[in-house]
């Protein structure tokens, strides 16, 4: 780590205010070029602390940048983690106003819900599958707080990996009945296909992406409690949305999930 605790705290306040006020800001590494990965996760964890101190519940976590398509789209070369706050959840088929966000994009994902706690380091696919209660189709709405959705790796990690909203839907299914790598996905906007995906596009196996999140959390002493939601990462690149758009994801054997933007 290179930054003093007071700078970590003020950058966390700056980025959280950008999220809460839906205002974009310059990338933080412009003013703090020495900011490293440890500083970035310390800022993300300080945003987490600020929210829980105000009574917000952290309901789960996310893997970010787990597909080749996403890494290529954003010009980065490693995955990240973020946390999910209670108010990020939108009901299946629900609406969200684009005016409450900066420049939202959507991603097709598989969400895991845990029945046992998970803790890294050393968490692997088998540990994740054994601790999973069920999986669900999910849409993640990401919204970078940075101008023009442009950032470097450390800046996006500090910004909670662009976490903004998520929707869970479909039918909960036990992982013992499924091959998560070969699950097909059709992602649609306004009734037309946007992209097609498969589970293996998510870090080789969606449970491997979840293990990666658990291990990244473990590096800073965080456990994933039973009952957590973990978004395993986009199976395709992310797509911009505008008021009036209806987005739907169909996942083989898991049903569908949708969200509308007003
Ligand atoms: O969920 C994601 O893959 C987003 C991670 C952060 C990068 C981005 O905003 O695209
Ligand atoms: Mg995502």
Image (tube, rainbow, N blue to C red):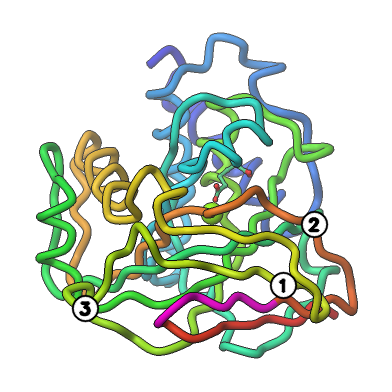
Q: Could you say whether the residue bearing mark 1 is in a helix, strand or loop?
A: strand
Residue count near mark 3 (Cα–Cα under 10 Å), binned few <14, some 14–19, many ≥20: few
**176 lies left or right of 150:** left
Magenta stretch in the rendered image: 248-253
In the image, which disc is placed on residue 1?
none
Q: Are marks 1 and 3 in contact (CB under 8 Å)?
A: no
Return the residue at label 1. 188
Residue 240's disc is 2
Q: Quadrant of the C terminus?
A: bottom right
The label on residue 177 is: 3
Give above or below for 179 relative to 146.
below
Disc 2 packing (10 Å; few <14; some 14–19; many ≥20): few
Q: Is residue 82 above or below residue 116?
A: above
- Tell whether 222 sits left or right of 98: left
Q: Name the secondary structure under disc 2.
A: strand
Q: How many marks?
A: 3
Q: Which of the pair 185/32 is nearer the observer?
A: 185
């Amino acid at each position: 780590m290179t930054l003093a605790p007071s700078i970590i705290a003020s950058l966390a306040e700056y980025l959280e205010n950008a999220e809460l006020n839906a205002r974009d800001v310059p990338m933080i590494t412009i003013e703090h070029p020495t900011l490293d990965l440890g500083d970035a996760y310390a800022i993300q964890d300080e945003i987490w602390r600020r929210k829980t101190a105000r009574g917000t519940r952290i309901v789960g976590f996310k893997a970010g940048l787990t597909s080749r398509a996403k890494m290529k789209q954003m010009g980065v070369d490693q995955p990240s983690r973020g946390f999910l706050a209670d108010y990020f959840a939108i009901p299946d088929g629900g609406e969200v106003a684009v005016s409450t966000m900066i420049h939202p994009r959507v991603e097709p994902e598989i969400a895991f819900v845990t029945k046992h706690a998970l803790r890294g380091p050393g968490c692997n696919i088998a540990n994740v599958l054994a601790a999973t209660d069920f999986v669900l189709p999910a849409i993640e709405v990401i919204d970078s707080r940075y101008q023009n959705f442009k950032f470097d790796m450390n800046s996006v990690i500090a910004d909670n990996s662009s976490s903004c909203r998520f929707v869970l839907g479909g039918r909960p299914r036990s992982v013992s009945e499924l091959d998560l790598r070969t699950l097909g996905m059709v992602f649609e906007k306004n009734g037309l296909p946007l992209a097609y995906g498969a589970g293996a596009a998510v870090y080789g196996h969606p449970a491997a992406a979840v293990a990666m999140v658990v291990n990244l959390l473990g590096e800073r002493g965080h456990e994933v409690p039973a009952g957590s939601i973990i978004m395993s990462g986009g199976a395709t690149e992310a797509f911009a949305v505008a008021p009036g758009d209806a987005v739907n994801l169909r996942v083989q054997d898991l049903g569908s999930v949708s969200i509308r933007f007003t």
